[in-house]
Image: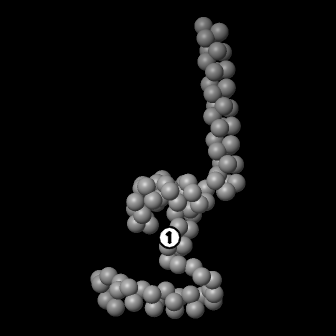
Amino acid sequence: MPADQPWTEDGFRSSWSKAFDNAGINEDLTFHDLRGSAVIRLALAGSTVPEIATFTGHSLKDVESILDKHYLGRDVRLAESAARKLEAMFQNTHFNNSAERLSHESV
């Protein structure tokens, strides 16, 4: 198939099947499973919802739905990242407040 032509349904199905066979995958997975996994991996990499939607071809609403319903609540890395950010915010706030107090006291 020429590179500038869109996939046909049969052509895609055939290529998908061959790719599964070549990879030794014997699970019942679909292309949509792959797209959903891409949504999650992109989010974990720090991509924004609009970036993810542009990359995967989902709508913004669909990306948010996938993230909300299926995956992100189960990923401990996100909770750890959020905790680090919160901790950093408080450290920076404490440092800034202490530095401000010192600068006002020395005036």
Dot 1 alpha-carbon crowd within 10 angstroms: few under 14, some 14 to 19, many 20 or more: some
**Tag 1 secondary structure:** helix
Residue linked to disc 1: 35
Give the residue displayed 59% in from the left and 60% down from the top: 70
Q: Looking at this rendering, what residue extends furthest in the left direction?
A: 4
Q: Is residue 75 above or below residue 19?
A: above
State the image coordinates of residue 24 (x, y, percent, origin top left). 63, 89
Q: Is residue 28 above or below residue 76?
A: below
Name the quadrant containing residue 7: bottom left
Question: Going by the image, does 70 lie left or right of 11?
Answer: right
Please name whichever residue, 99 or 62, is drawn nearer the observer in this view of the structure.
62
Left or right of 57? Residue 42 is right
**Residue at figure coordinates x 61%, y 11% from the top left:** 104
The image shows residue 64 at horizontal and vertical percentages of: 49, 54
Residue 10 in sight in this render: yes
- What residue is at 49 percent from the left and 86 percent from the top? 16
The one of 67 and 104 positioned closer to us in this rendering: 67
Residue shown at 39%/90% (left/top)?
10
